[in-house]
Amino acid sequence: MPDWFVYRGTGEPHDGISQLPAPPPWRDFDGGPAVVPAPPLGTESTRRLGTRGRRGIAWRQEELELINAALYLRRPLLVTGDPGSGKSTLAHSLAHELDLGRVLHWPIVSRSTLREGLYTYDAIARLQDMQLAKERGEHGRRGERGEPYAEDIGEYLRLGPLGTALLPYDRPRVLLVDELDKSDIDLPNDLLNALEEGEFLITELQRIARRQPRADVLTDDGTRAPVQEGRVRCRSFPVVVMTSNGERDFPAPLLRRCLHLDLPSPRNDESGAARLEAMVRAHFGDADRPAHDALIRDFLQSSPGSLRAADQLLNAIYLTQQAVRDSEPDRRRLAELLMRPLDQGDHGTR
């Protein structure tokens, strides 16, 4: 393995992130004040990586080169591939191996907007609290239940996953922008400025910056972070993993700001199959390995050209080893039922 690799894909935690050289001058950021370290790795990462020992992911050399190039260049990584090819798992593997804490997860749907990824402002709650305080004649000192009423506007602001990732952490956070191809047509272009400049403005704080230059806002982690004069600017550019199932094309301005990693289907490529096998071992260990290998072969070889997801294989292995462990014909029949192609015309209907 080349010495310059920071991420090795072995699953063994290490402090390789501190070995990164200084960023390119055009990707050097100077945000502040520094915020507290990220919370520890969350249960979502444990679920993704498996609880029987995180054994790493079987990457090809060129895939590792692209992943590490994104880390060196402080550029987002656009990861495309079929369901179950390991796109989302990559973000959790990076956070685990490089000890970067909880993954910030932004699941994209057709209604997702840049604003919700950056921050939300609950103006209605603030107005209601102000009205209640006025009615009680408390001049903004107490809330509805007698608790201290927050005059600080930061109490009504919450940073989204992208907004939290752009806080000035000393060590980068990992941000998973999941299924970007599900977004409205405008979102990929809307992301450009935040990803290029590494910063964004909170309009509500800028309006009061003269009388309140600093506000403590809630983050996506549920902690508080200081924001100066309404500007959030990163110090270490986050490790951004954007996933896509390839259901649409993205605009050229976004593509040139990213490094593109295309993961082969486990059914069509040896490295993809190796990743699938590593995933099964991570979740189920080596016990009952012959039965697992038989189901993996069925998953990879049956119905060439059809679409299946790794989740189907994991479901089949779990259910068959729990429900029909001693009957090989029943195991194969139940597994076949659970692993029917997703693109089958009458899938799920009779």
Image (cartoon, rainbow, N blue to C red):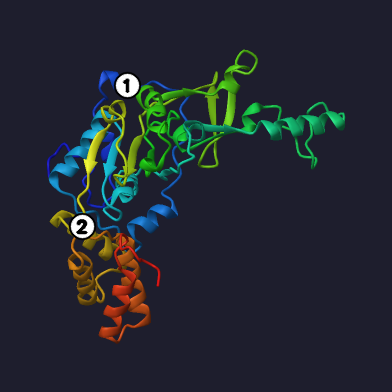
Label 2 element class: loop
Disc 1 residue type (three-letter):
Asp
Q: Which residue is mark 1?
A: 28
Residue at left 71%, top 27%?
151
Q: Which residue is mark 2?
A: 266
Residue 19 % position (x, y): 24, 34
- Among the 4 quarters of the image, the one containing residue 292: bottom left
- Whether residue 339 is visible here, answered yes or no, is yes
- Among the 4 quarters of the image, the one containing residue 65: top left
Give the position of the C terminus as an image quadrant: bottom left
Q: Earlier in the sequence, mark 1 or mark 2?
A: 1
The span from disc 1 to disc 2 (Cα, nearest Å) is 37 Å
In this view, the residue in front, 159 or 23, is 159
**Closer mark to the observer between disc 1 and disc 2:** 2
Image position of 76 (left or right of 40):
left
Marks 1 and 2: CB-CB under 8 Å?
A: no
Disc 2 residue type (three-letter):
Pro
- Whether residue 20 is visible here, answered yes or no, is no
Q: Is residue 14 above or below residue 17?
A: below
Image position of 290 (left or right of 144):
left
Residue 99 % position (x, y): 34, 44
Image position of 10 (left or right of 322):
left
Residue 288 % position (x, y): 25, 77
Residue 259 % position (x, y): 24, 34
Decide: few, some or many residues near mark 2? Use Cα within 10 Å; few <14, some 14-19, many ≥20: many
